[in-house]
Amino acid sequence: MKRNSIQSISLATIISAMAMTTGIAWAGQDAAAPQFAWKDGAEIYAKVCALCHEATIGPMLRGRDLDPLYIRLMVRNGNRAMPAFRASEIDDASLQQLAEYISKATAEK
Ligand code: HEC
């Protein structure tokens, strides 16, 4: 009887230890894979828009004082060769930052 309870205690200890370590492992995975977020408008411009708009594929956007609303509408809807970007690619808050960044960006780099 005594032996049995010792066995069950040690089994319970092992199980809870395992649960704790797997719990920690899960928490670690969550922390290691946070939801993706753009840093700022400049990052989006450099990593997405510049591929065309700094490569003579799309028209120059900097230094034209473009209306941020116009930029946002272009990005969401696209226009002919300009692709549309969904909120899952560029979220609304980031798009707002991007539009303001481009609107204020000067022609000189
Ligand atoms: C695959 C290439 C490509 C990418 C990437 C791209 N664009 Fe464009 N964009 C174009 C082209 C080409 C046009 C011109 C479309 C036309 O008039 O046929 C354009 C047009 C525009 C216009 C209208 C410019 C004007 O003179 O009226 C805006 C604003 C714009 N893009 C913003 C953006 C932003 C902001 C991004 C980044 C999120 C972006 N584009 C990414 C190709 C691209």
Image (cartoon, rainbow, N blue to C red):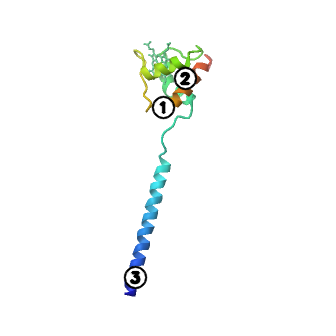
Q: Quadrant of residue 87?
A: top left
- Cα separation between marks 2 and 3: 68 Å
Q: Quadrant of residue 68?
A: top right
Packing grade of label 3 (10 A; few <14, some 14-19, many >=20) is few
Amino acid type shown at disc 3 = Ser
- Front residue of 18/76: it is 76
Secondary structure under tag 3 reads helix
The quadrant of the image that shows the C terminus is top right
Residue 54 appears in the picture as rendered: no
Packing grade of label 1 (10 A; few <14, some 14-19, many >=20) is few
Q: Which residue is mark 2?
A: 99
In the image, taking residue 15 as reference, residue 95 lies left or right, namely: right
Q: Which residue is mark 1?
A: 91
Amino acid type shown at disc 1 = Asp
Tag 2 and tag 1, C-beta contact below 8 Å? no
Secondary structure under tag 2 reads helix
Q: Residue furthest bottom?
A: 1
Query: Which residue is located at x 48 percent, y 23 percent?
Result: 51
Give the tally of numbered discs: 3
Lower sequence index among marks 2 and 3: 3
- Cα separation between marks 2 and 1: 12 Å
Secondary structure under tag 1 reads loop
Q: Which residue is mark 3?
A: 5
Relative height, residue 21 to residue 1 (above, below): above
Does the beta carbon at disc 2 come under 8 Å from ligand 1?
yes
Query: Which residue is located at x 42 percent, y 28 percent?
Result: 86
Residue 53's spot in the image, x, y percent? 50, 19
Lower sequence index among marks 2 and 1: 1
